[in-house]
Image: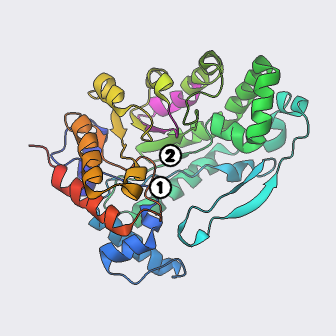
Amino acid sequence: CMSYQNAMDAICLRMPRKIPRTEYSASGYWSLIHAVTGIDVDASSSDAVKGEAARAFEKAWDFGFTWSILTGSQVLSECRTSMGHAVYAEGGTDYDARISCPFTDVEQVLSFDPWAVYGEQDKGELTRQYNEHYDINCAEHPDQVNMTGIYITMISGLLEIFGWEMLLEGLGEDPERFGETANRYASWIQQYFDALAQCKAPVVMIHDDIVWTSGPFVNPAWYRKYIFPNYEKLFDPLHKAGKKILFTSDGTYDAFVDDIAACGVNGFVLEPTTDMEYIAKKYGRTHAFVGNADCRILTLGTKEDIRKEAERCIRIGKDCPGFFMAVGNHIPSNVPVENALYYNQCYEELAYRD
């Protein structure tokens, strides 16, 4: 299948003639999917109809891969903060007003021991789960490069446990002791990385939201002392197993592109606020990268604006063998359907290398 081949060629830095692509959230945007596929589907349809429609949509839009992880907040359910969730999905199905935090003072944060709370895991069972997840993805997306992976690598895991208020309070009260909390968390989550290294997926997605849209939320020196050295330990078994590591962070991680590259990732997934031109210039021959059209332009822009944004991305990525096209901050259901269709038309017109 050309979708699979183009995507794997890009990940392996073998310049495909057609620039591959993926999109986020679009496979749950039922009005768009109906417009593309003609399948009668909406938020109330059965899972079977939704699955058929999403597969047909991804085939029509020539997805090279679907972003996917297995290990998320569910493995922290023994002790985690609930921060609620605003409406994002079509039909408001993801709204959650529940807000609670198990921590009442900062000393509990600074002395937190994930080994005592979450315990030792069975690596063989974890590997079995990664294999099962990968197999399911392969069955659901047979024309794509499939993956499994981890969402709660470091900052995202600590955020799930503590929530923003207690996390920032811990950092503010004693950044070194909070760094030791981060180190303990890294030693615990290492179990999952060790198991991931043993699974059959050749490509793995590693996610960690390490910054805000404004950039780092604590002194960059803290990241370089407590986050990136742990990345190197966490990623080491993946390297030894020959995995291709794709790394995702939301926000603006310009300050840390070089640090992340030095930890040995094979590709960057980025939102529009991270400088893709810098990544292309410095790492465009050695790394894959995915992005980074801005959905705000798809939502509010004219056709001319949308074409210019697609052209910007293609101009940056066209000469880089590992470039994937994507709307970096998702195609949610408030993007007008006609604008999303026009964006796809622009992609198809621009995607072929000479």
Q: What element carries label 2?
A: loop
Q: Which mark is residue 199?
A: 2
Q: Is mark 1 on a helix, strand or loop?
A: helix
Locate residue 253, reporting x and y percent.
50, 30
Q: Residue 134 carries which label?
A: 1
Locate residue 217, reporting x and y percent.
64, 28
Q: How far is disc 1 from disc 2 in space, using C-alphas?
A: 9 Å
Q: Do the residues labelled 1 and 2 touch (CB within 8 Å)?
A: yes
Vertical position of residue 195 compared to residue 135: above or below = above
Vertical position of residue 337 compared to residue 220: above or below = below
Q: Nearer the viewer, residue 94 or 115?
A: 94
Vertical position of residue 102 compared to residue 13: above or below = below
Q: Nearer the viewer, residue 346 or 147?
A: 346
Residue at horizontal 52%, vertical 82%? 46
Q: In the image as oriented, which residue stretches furthest toward the bottom?
A: 40
Q: Nearer the viewer, residue 170 or 297?
A: 297
Look at label 1 and name its amino acid.
Answer: Tyr
The colour scheme of the drawn protein is: rainbow
Instruction: Please provide the residue range marked out in magenta.
Output: 233-252
The question of residue 191 being in magenta is answered with no
Q: In this view, does 315 lie to the left or right of 209?
A: left
